[in-house]
Image: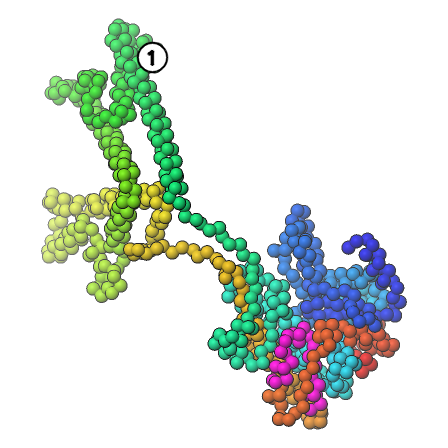
Amino acid sequence: MSFVSRIRRQTDYNTYPPSIPIVIDNGASYFRIGWAGETEPRVVFRNIVQRPRHKATGETVTVVGDLDPGLMKYFDCTRSGPRSPFDSNVVYQFEIMEYILDFAFDRLGANGSRIDHPILITECACNPVQSRSKMAELLFETYGVPAVAFGVDAAFSYKYNQLHGICKEDGIVLCPGFTTTHAIPFVDGEPVYKGSCRTNIGGYHVTDYLKQLLSLKYPFHSSRFTWEKAEDLKLEHCYIAPDYASEVRLFQEGTKEAEEKTRYWQLPWIPPPTEVPPSEEEIARKAAIREKQGQRLREMAEAKKLSKINEMESELSSLRFLVKQLDQVDEDDIPTFLSDTGYASRQELESTILKVTQSLRKARGEPMNEPSEGEENTDSLNNEKYPLMNIPDDMLTPEQLKDKKRQMFLKSTTEGRLRARQKRNEEELEKERRNQLEEERRRENPEFYLEEMRAQYKEVLERVEQKKRLKTNGSSNGNNKSGGVGRGERLSAAQRERMRLLTTAAFDRGKGEDTFGAKDEDWQLYKLMSKDNDDDDEQPDSDEAELARLTSRLQEIDPTFVQKVEGESLTSGEVPPRVRQLTEEDYKIVIGIERFRCPEILFHPNLVGIEQVGLDEMAGASIRRLPHEETELIEERLTSSILMTGGCSLLPGMKERLECGIRMIRPCGSPIVVVRAMDPVLDAWRGASAFAAKLNFLSNAFTKMDYEEKGEDWLRKYQIRYNNL
């Protein structure tokens, strides 16, 4: 608030003498405050308090009323929602109420902690004495007000409309408010609270019901259906159906009239970019680019390979030259020569030559088993490395026999590693050769190659899934109707043989003396029955490896390929499910039956689980609660002046539906007149303002001294006289 506006408000506040009361309409939805005798309240705001946290400093601030949308980027409101001082329609959170009164008095222009004006504040019908006592204590102790008066908002609205000739002296006021609905009969201009009744249904429940229905109908737009937006939709589109069942049937049949009553709310929607399939020229251009890039990569790989071969040939030549120099060196100078070259022995030098030779063969693509230049003396090298291998055992000492066994073990281990390495090299060469052949086939006929790969993938996938089905748990009693298999079909050949041997051994054991293990054949049988001897479980699955290879290949060459997820079954020609793109129709919110279904809970609260009477039955219940001697005389006068007030009275069709419902519960021919207040929202405050402007207002108020002397028992019976209005 700017400095100029604050000075102006303080000036306005100071122009009113202390005898002018302040009028407060403390509603569960909105808080209204102003001066007595005026027709409009000075300050109106939502009766809520929020405590958001500043995003930069982390400081918590108190915000009364609606938060300015422009401040949302500075505050974090996710951890603290709006809080109301009301429980239903009764004030019980007086700490929050104090925040609201501070804000209201500040906006009214009060510049001190003391309020020198009497206060008239509204409350609900039959307000509990604890709430009334706490409110009086708050006003007296915190703000130091000289006098306080309490009045019912619905009664003020009725008396204000009676003053303008809208309703009569005897009648009933029906007030569907924010969280509750009240019915109060008036006799001789005064409310009879013994005949009043209340239901726990109001405009809040209508808005919340509409929000829930739209969120369930459009779950992907649930974040857009805020409570404030649902409130706007309710005020703009909802109406009361004259006959709920007929209106529902109208929408179920989908008639033209139902179409005319349907409303549409178009959310912002941006169409997704359309994917235009590439032309043949574009496909050919991209293929040429890919071919050019592939050729460049192949040339780079070939150049790198030639460079590596040249390096290895140069290294091999230097190593052979080093061996020739070693042959010309004297025996005594060999250790010194080898230490200068970085080798510990001649065997290490020859082993290095052998490794470089094998690496050179692999780089050239030569078979590893074919001899090449420099490998003719391999046997001689082995003889020098393992000198005891070819000597008979009877010519060796015990120490030499141990050395011979160690040399035999080292030789077999080395040869095994060489064979395994040679096998891996051969497999890699074979894999590379097969990849080159497949690439040539793909270049010759890409479409035929792709179809062939898809067929192979499908065939291998079926085999793998069949094996997995055989391993799953199925029925074993022969009554399998779900396509499962028995245990005998799930076991492999080795597992079935092991089960047979175990069964036979157990059968033979029970015939007589247990002699299992006495013969060598028994231990052979034990090996066969051992689980560790199950070769079928240990050998790798070639089909799964082939499936992984085909999957990887199809992902490279087919951009539309979708790998099959485990647990799915795709039949031939079936397209895998894809996520549907949201269209413009998905962003069009259709509000049809919700327009009258949500307000219908005012007449049938059981639609939302509240087992109470509706708005039309409340008038009959209010009449029945009056004393019998009075009811027989004035019930016709009461039904001839029924006033609707409160925010929900603004819904179209409320008057006609309420009149029809009351006519059904009244005797035939009874006069029934239902009227709506001039302004159902502000008439309560205007009636209180007119009442507080009377000269005898202070006779209906009480001071702090009266409150302390008379106590809560007197406050429970306290009631103002509305005939003074």
Task: Say left or right for 470 vs 289.
Answer: left
Determine the residue positioned at 53% across, 76% down. Answer: 257
Segment colored magenta: 636-661
Colour setting: rainbow
Residue 258 painted magenta: no
Determine the residue positioned at 19% across, 24% down. Answer: 370
Which quadrant of the figure contains the C terminus? Answer: bottom right
Q: Where residue 438 appears, x then y in whole percent?
A: 27, 38
Q: Using the image as rendered, state which of residue 685 and residue 594 is in the foreground.
A: 594
Q: Using the image as rendered, state which of residue 129 and residue 721 is in the foreground.
A: 721
Which quadrant of the figure contains the N terminus? Answer: bottom right
The answer to whether residue 183 is above or below residue 400 is below
* Residue 713 seen by the camera: no
Task: Say left or right for 59 vs 296.
Answer: right
Determine the residue positioned at 15% across, 53% down. Answer: 500
Q: Using the image as rendered, state which of residue 362 and residue 526 is in the foreground.
A: 362
Q: Quadrant of residue 324?
A: top left
Q: Where residue 188 appears, x then y in whole percent?
A: 77, 87
Q: Where residue 44 appears, x then y in whole percent?
A: 74, 65
* Residue 392 seen by the camera: yes
Q: Where residue 463 appears, x then y in whole percent?
A: 24, 50
Residue tagged 1: 341
Marks counted in the figure total 1
Hey, what amino acid is under mark 1? Thr
